[in-house]
Amino acid sequence: MKKISLLVFSLFFVVAANFAQEKQEAKKTQQGHTDQNKFRQMKDVLATANDQHTASGAPGHQYTQQKVDYVMDIRLEESTNKIYGDETITYHNNSKDVLDYLWLQLDQNMRADDSKTPLASSNAAAAFLTPDNFKTSFMKEGKGFGFKIEKVETDGKALSHTINQTMMRINLPKKLAPGETFKFRIKWNYKINDINKDGGRSGLETFPDGNNNYTIAQFFPRLCVYDNVQGWQNMQFWGRSEFALEFGDYTVNLTVPADHIVDATGVLQNEKNVLTKEQQNRWEKARKSFKEPVLIVTQKEAEIAEKGRATNTKTWTFKADQVRDFAFASSRKYIWDAMATSVNGKTVMAVSLYPKEGNPLWEEHSTRAVATTLIEYSKLTFDYPYPKAVSVHSERQGMEYPMICFNFGRPNPDGTYSDRTKKGMIGVIVHEVGHNFFPMIVNSDERQWTWMDEGLNSFVEILAELTYDPELFATNPANEITRYMGGDQSNISPIMSQGDYVKQFGPNAYSKPAAGLYMLRQTIMGPELFDQAFRTYAQRWMFKHPTPEDFFRTMEDASGVDLDWFFRGWFYTTDVTDIGIKEVKPLYLTDKPSERVTALKEQYKQYFEGLGELVYITDNKEEANPKAMDNYADGKEVPSFIYSVEFEKPGGLVMPIIVELTYADGTKEKQTFPAQIWMRDDTAVKRVFASTQEITNITVDPDLETADVDTSNNSWPKKESDKFDQFKEKVKD
């Protein structure tokens, strides 16, 4: 009965207040508004669920995707730095649609002499240029890059096709029905770019001794993705946003100079033909070595090899099943080491290739970093399904492909290196090997949603690095992203932006999504709920094409946590976190009701009689009576220090309020209020804290967990601003 009386009493005040307001504003018609509450559900921004991408975030019972198989003969011609390719492609139409044509990617055309890529960016006058770049820019002297398509045919007959910059359309001789396959052949060649001079995600590096390190990828015409989300993914490649590809099986013959060491996507099929007996024995030893890498080619052997120039060739044959791309590395300069790694009882080979210029850093850390990555990523996602992961050294690269990646990190010529170089090298290896999981297996559309591979991967990278070296990789991603988020809004894009037009690509696609996921795990959801949901997403979409909606929905579906408020704010806006303390008001126990309470007791006599005896709270210190609760405390100590704290939120993002209370004796207590505290008031909320001793300090977000861009309002009593704070304010102005 008491609860009912309280409800009626509360409702009375609500009705009375509304009536008074309506009476006062009767002459003015108010304009309506749409629901802008930060906790409204995301149904207005998420794609409609269907029988391929379900409302739970899982693949639906009608989910389909295409399959593409490649058989390729590739020849690397060292004398001209050209690649010659002859590939046979088998396209499997697993969709329910009839196809009139196929689209392929021709990435190398981005740097062709007639490429439009250089014309698509603002280009101010440079203070210095290389002579070659001056010729290219101002003397119209081309470098001869880009694909030279020699043949496109099927069954020995020419096949109609159209090249549109970095895309090629195959005009099918007849419509390709669901369940049918189409086989065709493309013969091509292209000149390899120098990575240091011409840029690029793959290419060659020339050393002073004339030897080259070839790290070759995006080197053959590849089928685009066709799905029920957007049809053909045939956006042009402008150089930044990467690629979406179909899974399939590869058989690749790589013909290179006979003194080269080669590794690639897939399993080597002809060890006996390309490896010496000693190298085969060492490789067998590496397959059983789980603690230390085994040198298959030593530095001494590599130094001898790099002095020669073979005139004959060898053909290395690799096979790979269920991969979405293929890449390889080739050089006579390679030192080669490997070790076995146990991933939940399955043996996976961790492998490194590097010239002597990478030592001693690479010999000490590369393969071990690969092994750590495979183990730690598998814990949070799924067991690594491929037989190996290879890290290849290149001076200025950081790029990933299935089972193989190219990584920077070069010591000084005398072999010394700084912690910064070591951290950068290990970090890039963990990151690029980690890309095997996102997006090489969980195969998101990188050209549209960069964060789905870079952001997710960067997040797991943080956890793997902390395992490898907790001291070297100590980090606070939430605090580190505040500089970007608190910067000039004209240079910031929402995470949910297509990568080509984002101004600050690194923070947008890598750091901010990673920081957001880190906060979800550490602060908002907790590791147990987060890890289960994240693992569910990864396993649901292995070897499939997920969308952002699939990720958002799965994280909620598998955790039972409403995260719409977080995803909407963090991913779809450029709002910032700024939560602070607006006011702290001391309150006191008393046995005397205020004039207002006295009036209420008279007005609602029956209600108050039902409540029985009362104690009161006042902000008037003179009326305080700390003993007012003594008769009701049952011998327990009564809190005599009471504080009303009003929290404000100048920033647009909602976040949990994490409060640290410091008591007079120096002890501290942390209390966390969920983000939902802002549901009914998006600007200010109040909480009352009671203690048996004085509270000397109140701090919001003491460990900098919520990416708060302005901590000047996070403490009570307010800290005296120092010169740095004053400088920051000037910068803001």
Image: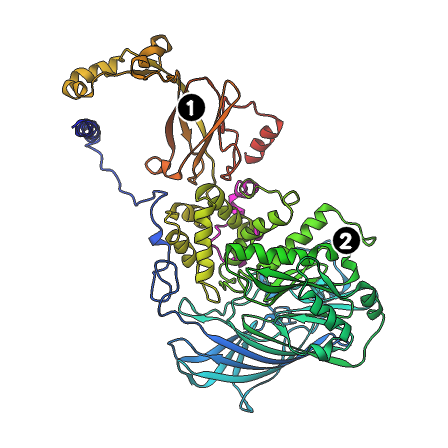
The kind of residue on which mark 1 rests is Glu
Give the numbered dot on residue 389: none
| Residue bearing the label numbered 2 | 411
Q: Residue at x 67, y 64 (%)?
A: 288
Q: Position of residue 550 (x, y in %)?
A: 41, 59
| Residue bearing the label numbered 1 | 583
Taking the magenta stretch, the answer to whether it contains residue 611 is no
Q: Residue at x 67, y 72 (%)?
A: 145
User: Which region is colored magenta?
Assistant: 480-506
Q: Position of residue 585 (x, y in %)?
A: 40, 19
Which residue of the protein is positioned furthest toward the top in this rendering?
A: 622
Position of residue 134 in the picture relative to residue 580 (left or right): right
Badge 1 marks a residue whose secondary structure is strand
Given residues 529 and 261, the one toward you in this image is 529
Q: Residue at x 48, y 69 (%)?
A: 233
The answer for how far apart the CA atoms under marks 1 and 2 are is 54 Å
Badge 2 marks a residue whose secondary structure is loop
- Quarter of the picture containing the C terminus is top right
**Tag 1 near tag 2, CB within 8 Å:** no
Position of residue 639 in the picture relative to residue 250 (left or right): left
The answer to whether residue 41 is seen in the rendering is: yes
